[in-house]
Image: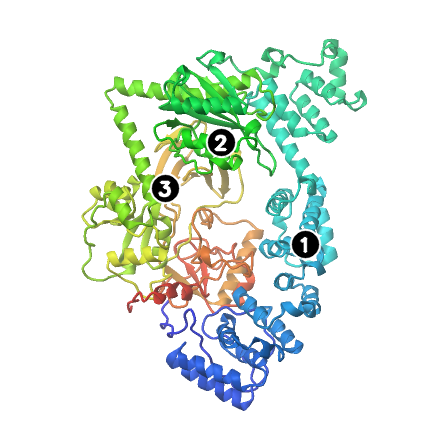
Amino acid sequence: MARQVQEPGRYSYGTSLSSHDRGQSPGYYSGLAPKPRTLPPREPLDEATFFWLNNLKRLWARWKRSDAVNQMIHEYLTSVLNPHEATLNIMIHCDDFHQGKMIEEFERWCVGKESFLLSQLTPEVQLKAFNTIIRQRNPNLVKAVFNTYDMLRVKELFLPAIRDLIDNKMYKEACQSATLLMLEEYFSTEDFLVPLIFQDKLLVAEEFLYTSPRLQHEVVAFLDHLLGRRHGVREEIDRIISRLQIPEVKRDKLYSKPLSKLVARLVKIHKLPPETCPNLNYRRSEGALQFLVHKKFQDNSLSVDSWREMAREAVGNDPRLHRELVDKVINQGAFKEAKYWVDEFDIPRSDWPGSLIAVITNEPELNASNSMDPSGEEEMEESWDNEPHLEYHIFPLEYDCITLVDTPGVFRDFLEAIKVSADTALENVELVGMDCEWKPFFGSKRNDLALIQVALKHHVFILDAMTMGQDCPDLWREFGRVFWDNEGIVKLGFNLLNDLQMMKTSLPELESCKGKDACVSESLARLVELCLGHRINKMDQFSNWERRPLRKSQILYAALDAYCLLEVYDKIAYGCDQQGIPFEEIKNEILTQMKSRKKVIKNSKKSTSRKEIVEEEEVPPGPYSEPVPARCLRLVCDTMVQGLGKYLRRCGVDVVILENNDSHDKCVKIANSQGRMIVTRGYTYSKLKQHVPLGYCYRVQSEDCDLEDQVKEVLQYFNVAISKEDIFSRCQTRVGFAGAVGVDHLVESLVTRTSRWEGWRVRRKKSWQHECRGGRFFSRSRSTDLALVISSSNSCECGARRKGLSLGRTSSINIWIISVAEAMCNGDEFTKVLPAKMEQLFQAWVTRSCGAVPDKGLEPVVHWDNEAGGFSDDDDYDTFSDEGTAAPVSRQGPLLRLSKGEVDVAQGLTSKGATVQLSSMHRGVTSKYPAFYICDTCGKVYWEGTHYERFVNIFIRDSFVLASP
């Protein structure tokens, strides 16, 4: 999009003050700044003010923000009778009124004159300021006007105006006003909170709720009441919408699951008691019960004791859940267990299910015994143990070698033994196995730590954190000092970071404990099976660890969970010794690196200390002696500099960014195959630089500074001549695929085996989402960057560069598996579309959506999960912006390459065959902006905004020279 370079001063504090003919009411916005929804009509300026404003405009055009401009404004404010009213008139006659530059200068002028100005601030002026500013989207401007015009002091004055906003269905503006004026006590939940929730404008409503405990309880109670409607949630919501006449309702968010998540979040944020939401608690308990039934009867992964402990915990004292538990057990055919529960809950025989009564009548022996021996699984129903008998790894030591540390005295003896290493059971404390246990939780409140297991070679200590957690803080601090802080003791753990987090949460005395978790195995049981031959029996893992006394099977499981780590360690050490691998050297090298990194982090603010600890390698000169245009630089950014890569792409640089699960070696592959240079940091630099030419791998030096400084560092190293037109000249949308209809049976008939590709296991059913569009089939893994495509064509064309691997051909159907890890558009060609044509695109899109859609391949859509879409920055998030619409993307200045292709309106396709992405846009946007720009590669639609200006100012602010195009 070729355009003139914007005038200096249209950035940051740059205000352009335009003169207008007196008596006219033209639009106040020039250029490409976003318009507010409405503004009050302008009052004509008197002749003197009109000429003064023209003089200010000329002075501003020459000097921008300067002492001369400030002095001129201050002299004007001193000369007028009512500075507040005069400032308001000048503000609304400025082109960039929404940026609030005049109010900023007025605030500076007011310093020291508050008492004098207060007498001149009349209610009429305050109401005029309120009506002028309340429809603005700039939150800083709104707050500044509210503060400068002292509206909080007379907040009741604005209640009628806020009521008018509510009557006009302007709920967002009403809520924001009430929040700034602290008027929570004057409004009920139905005034604007319920409408905002139904419109999916939650941020505005939640900000209002922060200071009103009364409304917090009322809103949660209201939403929880909806959850209690069970199958009539939508009907109840429709009645409320009709009664309150709420427009623009987001009905796709108004069903049980999103409402349950919202209630849970509000309860957690505002720390409300569980009694506030009984229906949510019931739904959670119902879900927990279903989960337990599945684990016991389908997975057969719970012992009888664990099953009964957790089932009893899930249903509590709710008679409805008691009957639900009995029904679910009967559905599994476990009538004897159902008889146990009806006796346990003392359910009257008249309330028993008919099937249970019939079975007991035909089998009197069930009625004779109302309990089950929990020590034997053979007494469970036959359907419970249809799995073949499995051998498990057992605890190799005697039961007497387990010590339960549950009193301060035993705890003190344990610590003393570690310090002196005198006890025979503690003669070797250089290597220990660590694990923790806590009760599973199903609600919003997490449970506390229950046990800490410390396994030595000949003994296992189980520390009862639940019993001693609050009673002996000094002993826990001593435990942290003599055990965790002792670098002479190597602690082995599996998924240790989760255990450490739970320890820090439950035991504040261990806040300073640190650890590293580099294990990538799928489970500890699998690791034990690979090393020791048998899995660990996990039937007691999911049990009530807070119940005292602990069962013997629980104690044995807890001890084995920690001790098996020592066995795995010894097995790996033995295997390395047999193969001639220097295991001890490798272990010591890893431990040394971990200690060095801790020191580097600790002394990160002292560059001299960093150089003493880490040997800094000298970075060679950059590859370019002459300036290189930003659009010509091709880079690949390692996983450790993903944020830096996004910033560089905004500057117009062609950047490929590795995903979190990509290995560092992929940088080298991409760099050599696509002619790119590598950007990384830390120790990875030494490894990667060996595989590319000198100067083609750069290590970021300023690791502890802002991203803006890192961007400038990289641009200077590669001698990049960045211009204003380069910024935001590339599409940054992440694309994937979407389809219309899910068809699991297609997988059943075509994919009947498990396949492997590049180390990934491709499974059907649970780990895949299946979608179909026309003659194509698409399936995307939730946990990996692989996708499965079934097509009748002989090639796998997916709209972007991807690696494809044919898995076979069945009945003229090709099965492809593709990698979508590099599905970042990065396109630099756009088609300019005027508002009239955008409206036609919308109309055609609506028509296609109502009927059959022609098969045009897989439709690119935006994924917001890993990278921010568009050109907006997370740091620029504005709680006062419109929710539910695409954020206006600023392009006030980028030099876009306009393609010669045309958009196919009927099919909604770009010249490169990508579907124009209209689903994320509000249709009303088409009439608000003069032009739209559609990426030819992915179909993403952009329009004018303000982010470009703010981003450019990052470089102007620090005198980073922007080259001319």
| Neighbours of disc 3 within 10 Å: few (<14), some (14-19), many (20+) | few
Residue 28 x, y percent position in the rendering: 52, 76
Whether residue 747 appears in this view of the structure is no
Q: Name which residue type carries label 3.
A: Ser
Residue 704 x, y percent position in the rendering: 34, 51
Eyeballing the image, is 233 above or below 957? Answer: above
Marks 3 and 1 in Cβ contact (< 8 Å): no
Q: Which residue is mark 2?
A: 476
- Give me the residue at 50% from left, 60% from top: 841
Identify the secondary structure beneath mark 2: helix
* Mark 3 vs mark 1: in front: 1
Identify the secondary structure beneath mark 3: loop
Cα–Cα gap, marks 2 and 1: 48 Å
**620 and 493: which is toward the camera:** 493
| Neighbours of disc 2 within 10 Å: few (<14), some (14-19), many (20+) | many
Marks 2 and 1 in Cβ contact (< 8 Å): no
Cα–Cα gap, marks 3 and 1: 51 Å
Cα–Cα gap, marks 2 and 3: 64 Å
Left or right: 891, with 548 as reference point: left
**321 and 487: which is toward the camera:** 487
- Name the image quarter holding the C terminus: bottom left
Q: Which residue is mark 3?
A: 795
Mark 2 vs 3, N-terminal side: 2
Identify the secondary structure beneath mark 1: helix
Mark 2 vs 1, N-terminal side: 1
Q: Name which residue type carries label 2.
A: Trp
